[in-house]
Amino acid sequence: GEGTSPNSKESESSHTFEALACIMWQVLPALESLVNGIASLWKPSVCQAMLANWQLVLVPAELLLLADPSHRSDATDCGHAQVTEVSMWLRQTREACYEVMAQLSHIGGNMRYFEHLHSNPSIVISLLGQWQHMENRHVRLMLRNGLLP
């Protein structure tokens, strides 16, 4: 019949695999740099240098819900709309980084992803080095999907 032969499907799969592997090795160092940059905000020297009203960007969103379970996010969560906006961007960016790591783990088993993490522990340190400032759901996401083969 018309279409592709089994050999061409294997070849296509092989090319897809090679492309994904190439992308993964490009993405991981950039992801590590981004996570390190974001994590540096929680260093004591950086926190102390922030104005008090800007320090609220570092508070996990979960704490707002713990204090008031009926709380719904709004523009004044961090006291000022601009601070809240930065806080939301920071949370969303961190979340995206963790989600990328989790997604890479799903496709990366055959591409030596976990071996790469083992031989490059700095990536894991970047992701979990500031665990005490991570939201619980991010810790769970990383442990369940991003780090366990």
Image (cartoon, helix red, strand yellow):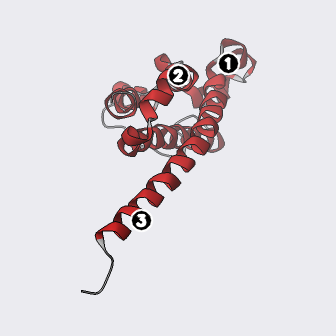
Residue at 39% x, 26% y: name it.
Answer: 139
Q: How many other residues sit within 10 Å of disc 3, few (<14), some (14-19) or many (≥20)?
A: few
Q: Secondary structure at mark 3?
A: helix
Three-letter code for the amino acid on which mark 2 is drawn: Ser
Give the quarter of the figure containing the N terminus: bottom left
Query: What residue sits 62% from the left and 31% below the top?
Result: 38
Residue 106 at what x, y percent from top left? 35, 43
1 vs 3, front mark: 3
Q: Single out the residue that lies furthest toward the top.
A: 44
For disc 2, the marked residue is 119
Residue sitting at the far front:
7
Q: Which residue is mark 3?
A: 12
Q: How far is the residue under mark 2 from the one under mark 1?
A: 32 Å
Work out whether 76 lies above or below 16.
Answer: above
| Among numbered discs 2 and 1, the one appearing first in the sequence | 1
Residue drawn at (45%, 28%) of the image: 115
Work out whether 45 lies above or below 59: above
Q: Point out the residue furthest to the right here.
A: 49
Circle 1: residue type? Cys
Quadrant where the C terminus is found in the figure: top left
At mark 1, the secondary structure is helix
Q: Amino acid at mark 3?
A: Glu
Q: How many marks?
A: 3
Give the residue number, with chain letter if any, for mark 1.
47
